[in-house]
Amino acid sequence: MVDMLRLVAYCKDKGFVFPGSEIYGGLANSWDYGPLGVELKNNIKRLWWKTYIQDNENAYGLDCAILMNPEVWKASGHLTSFSDPLMDCKECKARFRADTLIEDFSKGSVCADGMTNEQMEQWIQQHNVACPLCKKHNFTNIRQFNLMFKTNRGVVENDASAVFLRPETAQGQYVNFFNVQRSQRAKVPFGIGQIGKSFRNEITPGNFTFRTIEFEQMEFQWFCRPGEDEKFYQYFKQKAHDFSCELGLKNEELKYHNHEKLAFYAKSACDVYFQFPFGLSELAGIHNRTNYDLKKHQECSGKQMEYMDPITNEKFVPYIVETSFGADRSALAVLSSALKVEKLEDGSEREILDISLKLAPIKAAIFPLIKKNHATKAEQVYAEFRKHLRCVYDDTASIGKRYRRQDSIGTPFCVTVDDETLKNGNVTLRNRNTMEQTTMDIASAISYVISQTQI
RNA sequence: GCGGGAGUGGCUUAGUGGUAUAGCGUCGCCUUGCCAAGGCGAAGGUCGCGAGUUCGAGUCUCGUCUUCCGCUCCA
């Protein structure tokens, strides 16, 4: 596997990923997908959609608003658990939560929950609270650290108009549970999925596109009867594995970790880990969230969230098994897994993107064998191909160099136009995986490439 | 957020206070009948950004942004 520096350089060089706002010196943890990157990511999203929505019995798509009623985030717990009052010790540089400092110092006799930041600062000063690590008394002021991005609705900046950019897409599926159920006449168990951007104000440097302040999630929520949740949880663990393999990730690059320490909403949780160049890290998560979310929304909204089973006439708040894939992480995993560097005999190196035919950003490249003899015909062939497939045309340099260029970005098929094409319309189709060359007419070549590469 | 490195055409890089180097890549022409051949030519850099010191700064100082390594944090 290539190292991270090489991968980042490759991505910029070929047009997969560029640093965000680069001409202004960039913006930390933001990246732009280039011409090839957007094709790759779209292919990944299409494959996910096909796997989880299209080719899945009783599953429905959704595309929710990024800005939601702030009450949603109260109900989900994000407004409290995503927001920490932080203080740093100026002496030893350790960081603490102010409420934890107070509660630990008072041995639990003081509850800091109702205190304002000013009150907490005052309390810490009055009681001469020492740094638990270095025992000194030199804290910074409280800085409110909220993982959610806040913005304002309307023209007046005040708390009444504060709205948040969603930190996960899942809540959109939860609040629309009955809209989907009713409009689609869906029966539990059924699933709702969506692909969309989420935003988190992360402080951690990000390992390229692995952790960014703005990222795309592919989330699928399966709503089921209480008691069936563990069965479906096992089912979706297997499905996540199958999808990872369909991305072209190899068995030995994937690891599974069942959580013992669980988040407040989950009954059981499993993460899919991928061996990234910087280490083993999370690619996806499967969570049995129980009926926690819908019950919370029932409490907070006052709306009934109980489903009436039309066959048994039972009423229950559905359990939810969530499968959450990172779209950007998936793209990064695919690139990490596929990029190979070959050492040649003369000491130079060549890059090869050994990516699956379905995910390849460019499906075919069309070449005239000799520019001055075959360019006109080749341009016509290109015009035919691009009606059906994402493809490119290249008439520069030698034919071998053009093959190598396409190999370096994972293009599965190269189509060469030569004298024979001028005579009888046959082109030469070269397959990157097998290195085989076959001759066929243009229409057959297009059909064949479509059949091999479409999702 | 803390500590320490780094930033010169797309990439790699020379340059230790006196007019900005080269290779690769890219583009054009010639050549080339199938896996990075060859020849000729061209474009592309206010040296991350902003101040300061100096007659003069890519080079020294300060700030700032980005990035890498190590901590810290992490639904």
Image: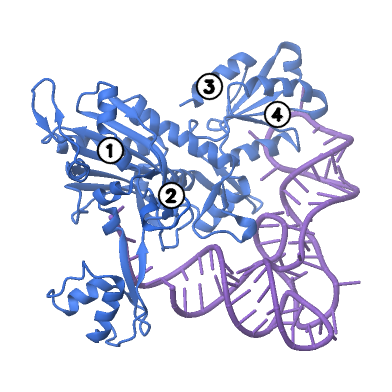
Q: Chain of mark 2?
A: A
Image location (x, y in percent) of residue A135: 27, 87
Looking at the rendered structure, whether the residues under marks 4 and 3 are on a common chain is answered as yes
From this view, report whether residue A432 is shown above or below residue A428. Answer: below
Image location (x, y in percent) of residue A254: 34, 46
Category of crowding for the residue at label 4, using alpha-carbon neighbours closer than 10 angstroms: few (below 14), some (14–19), many (at least 20): many
> How far apart are the alpha carbons under marks 3 and 2?
46 Å
Q: Which residue is mark 4?
A: A367
**Mark nearer the N terminus (3 vs 2):** 2
Image location (x, y in percent) of residue A273: 33, 49
Q: Disc 4 or disc 3, which is closer to the eye?
A: 3
Q: Chain of mark 4?
A: A
Looking at the rendered structure, whether the residues under marks 1 and 3 are on a common chain is answered as yes
Chain (purple): B
- The answer to whether mark 1 and mark 3 are in CB contact below 8 A is no
Q: Which residue is mark 1?
A: A175
| Three-letter amino acid code at the position of disc 2 | Arg
**Residue A132 appears in the rendering:** no
**Residue A151 appears in the rendering:** yes
Q: Which residue is mark 3?
A: A450
Q: Disc 1 or disc 3, which is closer to the eye?
A: 1
Q: Which residue is mark 2?
A: A153
Of A273 and A204, the residue lying toward us: A204
